[in-house]
Image (cartoon, rainbow, N blue to C red):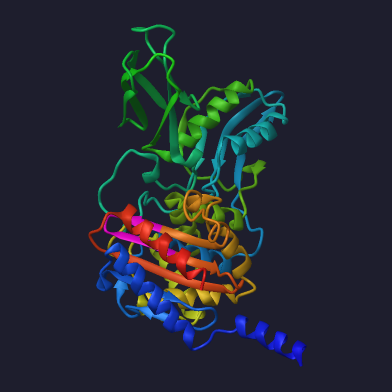
Amino acid sequence: MRYFFVIVGFLFVGVPTNSASRNFEEVVEQTMKKHGIPKSDFGFSIGSSKLEYSLNSNKKFVPASVTKVLVAGAMLDRFEKGAQFNTELQIGGNIEGSRLKGTLYLKGGGDPSFTSERLWYLVNEFWRLGVRQIDGDIVVDDSVFDDQRVDPGRDDTRVDRAYDALLSGMSFNWNSVNVYVRSGKSLGSSASVFIDPENDYIKLKGKVVTKGSRPRVKVSRKSMEGRDKIQVSGSIPLGSQEKVIYKNVSFPSLWSGYNLKEFLRQRGVLVKGVVRLGRLPGNSQVVAVSPGATVQELVSLMMKFSNNFIAESLTKHLSIVGGASRGNIQGGVTEMRSHLREMGVNTDAFKISSVSGLSRKNKFEITELWKLLNEYRNSFKIGPEFIASLPVSGMDGTLKNRLNGRFTRGRIRAKTGLLTGAVALAGYMQNRNDIQLPFAMIYNGSKKPWDVQVFFDDLLTRLIQL
């Protein structure tokens, strides 16, 4: 009889009870009161396999970057495991000895993760052909995507910071340049200023002086005739740690081509022609291929670090799955909505303006967002990679420095969201009884976002101990 009661007690812990919703409600209300959160400003849904508690369940909230949950789910659903977007070098013309008497084509496959390492791989593949001079031009073909460089659903304000990088079917280093400033060897001397990677696309101007007690460096970027001018000014203290500033580029496809030309030069290959945009001819020949990151890797990069550039690039790929001849945002959103219908959620509960979440026009119903998370958890096709892509509390991504207490570290995997007046968190928590609970919480109001994050973390710390 003793063994019988032990088994029954164990099963009782693992199954939701009617008291669960009462416990959730009590903890939520107490924590809201403690932090001064008005009920009307907060939406919250939670449950282990069915919805056990919800606040403002049918109210639409601005989700900020939690919008990327939809992009991630649709990508993992629509693409096979291990799918990649490759970048190619193709030639038009003949190789005679060590010379290419023709054109070198850089064909973009829409890989948002194409970086210096992948470009070096491509250049080394080409170098082994024995070509040391290209008589013609470098032509960049970015036609896998349309020419819309910015998601039209984003807020209208454009800045030159890296997070606002422009889209292209041929991207390089997140379509951004690194500007490094290092102090001189004596007070009053000129500081060293570098761009990385160096190439003819960027014209670097300005002067930074070694002086003062803290860095006061200003960097601006201005476009000019298919290239960019970087202007650097200000001061940096003697012996100060090197300062790095990231700026996006105005012409990402040409930026990619100029970097290819520079990498070839460093490998001993002279390009006689210019860098320009164009399309592959029908008779070109593939000579080198750089495999892109897998879809699973791209989704993880997007979710862990809330990367807007990846989110918008992946959305364009979704449109191609839906039948578009060239990747575009609107077609990708249509495919995302189709995916939501197939997951059994109410598509009217999701208003999507900006796929990266950079718009207050995005609106989600909290219960349908919870339902979608629950469906993903139960999907063998989507669930494992989706959950693995989420930031882990106290460990990595945008949750690395949050929820690091002994009850919460490593027990929460969730996507963050942050805009002026909007704070969000959605994912999964594992409570003290090792029950996995999908949850979604969104705040829309006037409190400072950092104070709201403290409220979120306090609430989860309490709930995880129920």
Relative to 45, say whether 126 is above or below.
above
Residue 213 at x, y percent in the picture: 33, 19
Relative to 414, say whether 256 is above or below.
above
Tell me if residue 352 can be seen: no
In the image, what residue occupies the spot 30% across and 59% down? 359
Residue 414 at x, y percent in the picture: 49, 62
In the image, what residue occupies the spot 44% across and 83% down? 21
* Quarter of the image where the N terminus is located: bottom right
Q: Residue furthest bottom?
A: 1
Number of marks: 0
> Any magenta on residue 421?
yes
Q: Residue furthest left?
A: 446
Relative to 180, say whether 176 is above or below.
below
The kind of secondary structure the magenta stretch mainly shows is strand
Residue 52 at x, y percent in the picture: 46, 83
Relative to 449, say whether 364 is above or below.
below
Tell me if residue 29 can be seen: yes
Q: Nearer the viewer, residue 53 or 89?
A: 53
In the image, what residue occupies the spot 55% across and 43% down? 114
> Any magenta on residue 45?
no
Q: Nearer the viewer, residue 269 or 410?
A: 410
Q: Nearer the viewer, residue 462 or 237?
A: 462
Residue 186 at x, y percent in the picture: 40, 6
Q: Residue furthest front?
A: 2
- The region drawn magenta spans 417-425
In the image, what residue occupies the spot 30% across and 60% down? 422
In the rendered view, does 96 fall on the left or right side of 71? right
